[in-house]
Amino acid sequence: MQYPVTVKFNKPIQDWCEENRIFLAHVHKISGVYKFGTPLRFDVPVFAEPYATLPDRAFMTTGAFSYCRSSGLPQAMRVGRFCSIAVGCEVMGVEHPMTSITTHVMAFRKYWQNDITKMRGDAPEILKVTPGAKGVTVGNDVWIGQRVLLRRGITIGDGAVIGAGSVVVKDVPPFAIIGGAPARIIRFRFDEETIARIQRVKWWDYAPEHFAGMDLSDPRAFLDSLEERIAGGLEPYKPQPFNLAKVFSKLAGAAARTPPAAPPGWSRDAAE
């Protein structure tokens, strides 16, 4: 499939989302989020596991049971399972070169060079700047507070917490609580032994019903119970992720090819 891909939202797509539990807005909303006929654009492949809640009016690769309430994040973003992303979060724009004579787009943007050449006759040659990553990689069980600004290309480790209004310019270690501008580590959620144990058990590989009857307030007791169930044969939750552009394109195409229903008493065979 070639990107970008644009499809028009329709009843078959909505029904498919209902059937496969792909939520289109927080909390667990599908119906009424998009009007039929609304164009949906995919610039890159976007994958979603069942029970993922995508941001309203936006799409990005999202793991099961995660939700995002920020619609301004790039589709190149990748989010693990059981993540919570609040409103107003953004990823920084492209970085400008700082070692050249100027940080202005004159130094590195082809569109600017072309426009100025047309308007003023000539422009300096642009620098060869390696484009950075567009998105951010978010682990599992990550909580990102309101209005957080993230630098392109960073990785946020499993279990991390980012305070509201933070400006995150570098990778975040697993289970770190960070905040500020620029964000710095305030403390870690658990001791090293507990963090290592959580990363080994990977509780997010399982589904919520697997945790029924466990004490969520006591991490060690929770892990004891989960490891006992795993030893007893509990299997991880492994749904097949959906390529949304492919699925939606197929459903939009099928709808376009479906002939309108015949009026009562009208015979298509007779008309043909």
Image (tube, grey):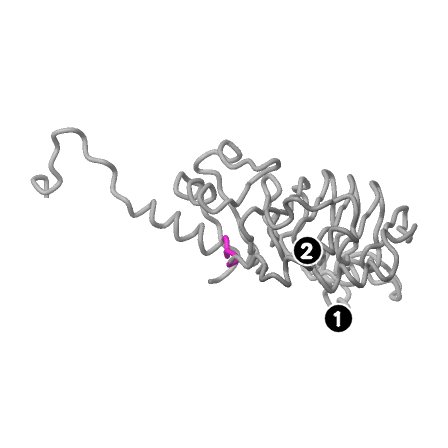
Of 197 and 165, nearer the camera is 197
Q: Which x, y percent locates residue 231?
A: 64, 63
Packing grade of label 1 (10 A; few <14, some 14-19, many >=20) is few
Across and down, in percent, residue 41 comes to 53, 49
Judging depth in this view, the residue of 234 and 69 nearest the camera is 234
Q: Position of residue 247 (x, y in %)?
A: 44, 53
Which residue is pictured at 58% across the width and 40% down the height? Answer: 57
Question: In the rendered image, which quarter contains the C terminus?
Answer: top left
Q: Which residue is mark 2?
A: 226
Above or below, 214 against 97 in this view is above
The amino acid beneath tag 1 is Lys
Q: Among all residues in the image, which is located at the extreme left?
A: 270
Instruction: Report if residue 167 lies within the magenta region.
Output: no
* Residue at disc 1, secondary structure: loop
Q: Give the mark toward the camera: 2 or 1.
A: 2
Q: Position of residue 25 (x, y in %)?
A: 59, 38
Q: Which mark is residue 128?
A: 1
Say whether disc 2 or disc 1 marks the residue closer to the N-terminus: 1
Is disc 2 surrounded by few (<14), some (14 to 19) or many (20+) residues within 10 Å? Answer: some
At numbered mark 2, what does the secondary structure look like: helix, strand or loop?
helix
The residue sitting at 88% across, 57% down in the picture is 191
- Region in magenta: 240-244
Which residue appears at 56% of the width and 55% of the height?
43
Q: Amino acid at mark 2?
A: Leu
208, 247: nearer the viewer: 208
